[in-house]
Image (spheres, helix red, strand yellow):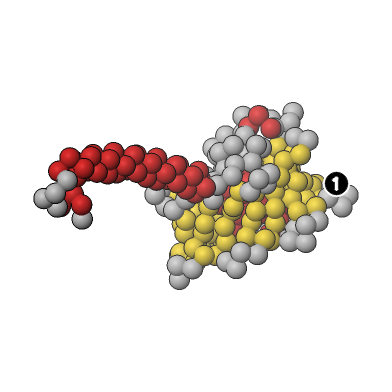
């Protein structure tokens, strides 16, 4: 190359200086490009946050064989409840101070309302006739009671040091939700762990997500309500 020749020393020096300057400009441009790409990827990885759920983030639950069981995934204006095959089973959005829950066909199936007060209280209404189908309420000990539309107790989640113990109205153990700083797990009545997530989510939300007497849309709506719905949306 020219700058390795014994001839044209001055030209060689000029070329070397020019190349050095070009390399410097290229390095700066490359660094800026990588920085912008990293910023874009960082923003993309956090995902969208619907205005009604400013703290929303993806939550993935794995089954006992480490395969995704279901997930909560925020999109532009709602939070989706998806199965392991990425099929949307329910979607939850906020409208007029309450949550609107759609089924897998995109039809409005349920409404979730929250009453203001010191302790948690949620009402689940059927979209068909606005009748109350379920009531969720917490007492002063943070135990959570689940009642049907006739105010009949159907389950109780008792607060424990590890999280919650979920039992039927007759006292039969349904599940235990264990919450630690890095992981939340669910064990069935026989003590087998069948769900695990390392994404942050309140144990109260997990209790309501895994209660099998709820239709999947109701479980999704209550899970979103207790995990991501700000208290300011509660109605008197």
Going 72% across and 41% down the picture, which residue do you hit? Answer: 94
Instruction: Confirm whether residue 169 shows in the render.
Output: no
Name the outermost residue toward the bottom.
65
Q: Position of residue 3 (x, y in %)?
A: 18, 49
> For numbered disc 1, what is the local secondary structure?
loop
On screen, residue 117 above or below 11? above
Task: Locate residue 65, reporting x and y percent.
Answer: 45, 71
Residue 130 rendering spot, x and y as whole percentages: 85, 46
**Residue that appears at 62% across and 60% down:** 82
Q: Which residue is mark 1?
A: 130
Q: Is residue 22 found left or right of 92 in the rendered image?
A: left
Quadrant, the N terminus: bottom left
Task: State the residue in front, 84 or 233.
Answer: 84
User: How many numbered tags mark residues here?
Assistant: 1
Residue at left 61%, top 64%? 86
Q: Is residue 230 above or below residue 11?
A: above
Looking at this view, is 171 or 62 the one in front?
62
**Please, which residue is most extreme toward the right here?**
129
- Locate residue 121: give its quadrant: top right
Q: Is residue 7 visible?
A: yes
Q: Residues within 10 Å of mark 1 (few under 14, many from 20)?
A: few
Side (left or right) of 97 relative to 168: right
Q: Quadrant of residue 26?
A: top left
In the image, 230 versus 21, the foreground residue is 21
35 relative to 2 in the view: left or right: right
Q: Position of residue 43 (x, y in %)?
A: 50, 43
Farthest-out residue, left: 6
**Quadrant including the C terminus:** top right
Q: Residue at x 38, y 41 (%)?
A: 29
Residue, far front: 7
């Amino acid at each position: 190359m020219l700058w390795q020749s014994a001839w044209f020393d001055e030209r060689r020096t000029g070329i070397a200086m020019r190349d050095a300057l070009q390399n410097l400009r290229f390095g700066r441009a490359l660094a800026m490009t990588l920085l912008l790409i990293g910023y874009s990827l960082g923003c993309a990885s956090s995902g969208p946050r619907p205005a009604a759920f400013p703290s929303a983030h993806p939550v993935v639950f794995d089954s006992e064989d480490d395969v995704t069981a279901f997930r909560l995934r925020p999109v532009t204006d709602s939070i989706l409840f998806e199965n392991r095959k990425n099929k949307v089973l329910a979607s939850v959005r906020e409208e007029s101070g309450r949550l609107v829950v759609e089924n897998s066909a995109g039809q409005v199936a349920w409404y979730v309302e929250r009453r203001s007060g010191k302790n948690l209280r949620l009402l689940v209404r059927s979209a068909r006739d606005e009748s109350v189908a379920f009531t969720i309420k917490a007492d002063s000990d943070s135990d959570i009671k689940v009642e049907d539309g006739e105010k009949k107790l159907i389950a109780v989640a008792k607060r424990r040091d590890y999280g919650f113990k979920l039992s039927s109205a007759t006292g039969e153990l349904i599940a235990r939700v264990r919450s630690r700083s890095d992981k939340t797990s669910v064990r069935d009545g026989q003590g087998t762990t069948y769900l695990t997530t390392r994404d942050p989510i309140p144990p109260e939300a997990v209790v309501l997500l895994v209660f099998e007497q709820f239709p999947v849309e109701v479980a999704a709506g209550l899970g979103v309500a207790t995990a991501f719905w700000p208290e300011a949306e509660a109605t008197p």
